[in-house]
Amino acid sequence: SGSSKRHKEHGHSHQHKKPRYVDAPDEEQSPRKSATELNGTTPQKLVNGYKVPKPHGHNNLNRINGVGESSRSKNFRSNSSTDLQLQEQRKQLPIAKGRDALVAEIGKHDVTVLLGETGSGKTTQVPQYLLENGVAGKGMIAVTQPRRVAATSLADRVSKEQGASVGDIVGYSVRFDEKYTSGTRIKYMTDGMIVRELMSDPLLSKYSVVIVDEAHERTLRTDLLIANLKTIQKKRNSTLDPKGKGNADKMNPLKVIIMSATLDAEKFSKFFHNAKIIYVKGRQHPVTIYHSSESQVDYVDAAMRTFFQVHVDQPPGDVLIFLPGEYEPHFIRVPELKNALGQEDIESLEKSITFFAKRLPADKMDVLILPMYASQSAHKNTKVFESAPSNTRKCILATNVAETSITIPGVKYVIDTGKCKEKQYLARDSGGGFDTLLTRDITKSSAMQRAGRAGREGKGVCFRLYTEQAFESMKRTAEPEILRCSLTSSILQLKCIGQNMEELDLMDKPDIDAIYSALKTLWLLGAIDKEQKLTSTGRRMASFPTEPHLSRSILASSEHNCTKEILTIVSILSSSSKLFLDISDQREAASDSRRKFRHPSGDHMTILNTFRSYEEVSKSESKSQRKEWCKKHFINEKCLIEGKKIREQLIDVCKKVGLDPNSSCGENEDPVIKSLGYGLVGNSAFLQPDGSYKQTMGHSIVKIHPGSCMVNEKVPAIIYDELVYTNQIYARGVSAIPRSFFLKHAALSQRQA
Ligand code: CDP
Ligand code: MG
């Protein structure tokens, strides 16, 4: 293959050896060729070579020094029920050598910044060390994660290591799902959940240690947590009560540990008055990196081709493919994030790899595809940690959760699309604005982390589906989320604990305009008054684990006697996957078979009809018949199952705040649309004389999305769940609403004025 001459190797660590290259696939035999037919796209060039990068000058996977002196653990718990093999694995982890020194350091300091390579054992071991060595005292240890899939799978693993079942000594808490008891000592939780706990327990008094993991990701919730931890610590750890009212010395002190997979630790340390930084050495084998010689238009297709290139030509070893994806928005549903968790790319790649894997010659290894993303069941997610059956190559399709949060054993090859989904705030010209998810190039730091995943257990190879120049032009690290995301739900939560975002001691302060626009949205929803003070409506809204505008609709539903209906709709909207499968070449067939659910008022009532039909079917049919029914109607059962679970939780919240979850309006859609209108008042548009729709709260012209049942309708006014930006602005999740709604409701129209 001609391109091979260009290949040179760049060892990821200090090792260098003779160039090795990957042959260009034979286009005639390659299963990848027909892949393009499968996708129905015009054939594109094969990924026929990976040019090796010049040395980057920064040794990202440089080894860093170990933790203090190595010493053996004296306090190891011997528990007859724990798996000896697991205990052996624990002792083999790089971090185990420095256990005592590490525990001593943490014991000495209020705040410790712990840096270390991914896979060294920080997340799974440190909480156990603190528990086993008694550093945590009687309190609980919280370990926060930006992604729920990491929180649940870590709880699973650490429970096993403790010889207990999940929810016992080790538990978790993520949006819409939690497993822990009063006896739980280590709780893996999303950063969003702990920020939420501040509302009921402002000093986090249940916890004696809070470990902020993956701090380098600088999610909005992590930043809010860090700011609060600093002030909480001041209150809890000062033995002298400044006001002289006593009791302060009785409070249990709080330890804070900031963990990061990257070297950007100085900033955390500085923020916490020059806190101690400790480095944990990891094990990193050299990784050979190949860059694509030209940029790839279709990264899913390119990933599939590269996978087979590896599978056909390369020795055994599992493959980890990084696809764009985003940590889920925790307990807050940001409508614009819908369908943006990366599972669509993952599903389409899974399908095409499965398709071609079946057609491989018999002498090739089998392929076991394992997707790893938030919305699939925890059980499925644990499968990625099991080793593959004999003569089988695991192919893990992951979002960036596998970048640093979790380490998957057996991986020798990494295929990096170079893409991620990033939340980005789009300001509206009228003020106000919203988050959107954009597929973006990853940062250099991410690219290095991804490559590093191939070298966990031995020498590895990383195929980058982008050019070396593309790598060089990547940003070094990502911008903190607080500087680029909507602050609406955070500001509402902060108001509930009496804090104003602009007064917080944050590592990075958001733009005052972003704060202003969030305040405006909250005011529009009636959550705050003209003086920016929290209203009783606002306080009740914050009790719901949903996005503020959906919470507002739930509250409105109680006045319109349709809480039952609204809860169903909100639950489906809060699910992490789409209700209706949108397969472009079967769009007509799909819409035909779904016609019977269609409601003239639009997509929201259509959702309700679909859910109701599903519940009917569920009553009499078997599980497989139910599946068949969903398939026939192009309905995504996953969304319904998740939606039902969310619904249960929302019913609980309703009961707690005194709303009747069963108030129902029967078949009358009027109250439902009105209730939705209260929440979606900012997401509304009026029909123009020329037939287009114009935002009521902005000046943009929006079109109704082709996937909406309202696409061919002209009604005086619409509300919508989200805007999607392509070449045009599309409104998705659309319902007709009487124009008079906006006029009749004086409070609303006043706000709009
Ligand atoms: O946090 P850090 O990246 O330093 O490492 P960790 O998450 O504590 O993981 C330590 C090791 O535990 C990994 O190398 C995995 O091999 C193993 N592990 C696992 O097998 N299954 C899990 N669910 C989590 C971790
Ligand atoms: Mg970790």
Image (cartoon, grey):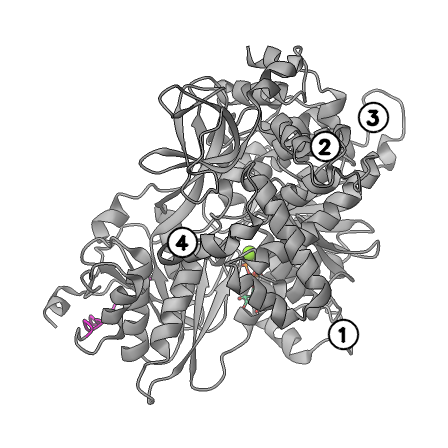
Q: Where is residue 650 in the image (x, y as percent from the top left)?
A: 73, 44
Label 4, on which residue? 587
Q: Earlier in the sequence, mark 3 or mark 4?
A: 3
- Image vertical order of residue 618 relative to residue 748, above or below: below
* Left or right, 480 with reference to 108: left
Q: In which quarter of the image is residue 248?
A: top right
Label 1, on which residue? 78
Marks 4 and 1 sit apart, C-alpha to C-alpha, by: 59 Å
Marks 3 and 4 sit apart, C-alpha to C-alpha, by: 67 Å
Label 3, on which residue? 241
Would you say the residues marked 3 and 2 are in contact, meaning their CB atoms lie under 8 Å apart?
Answer: no
Q: Is mark 3 on a helix, strand or loop?
A: loop
Q: Is mark 4 on a helix, strand or loop?
A: helix
Q: What residue type is labelled 3?
A: Asp
- Residue 204 shows up from this direction: yes
Label 2, on which residue? 557
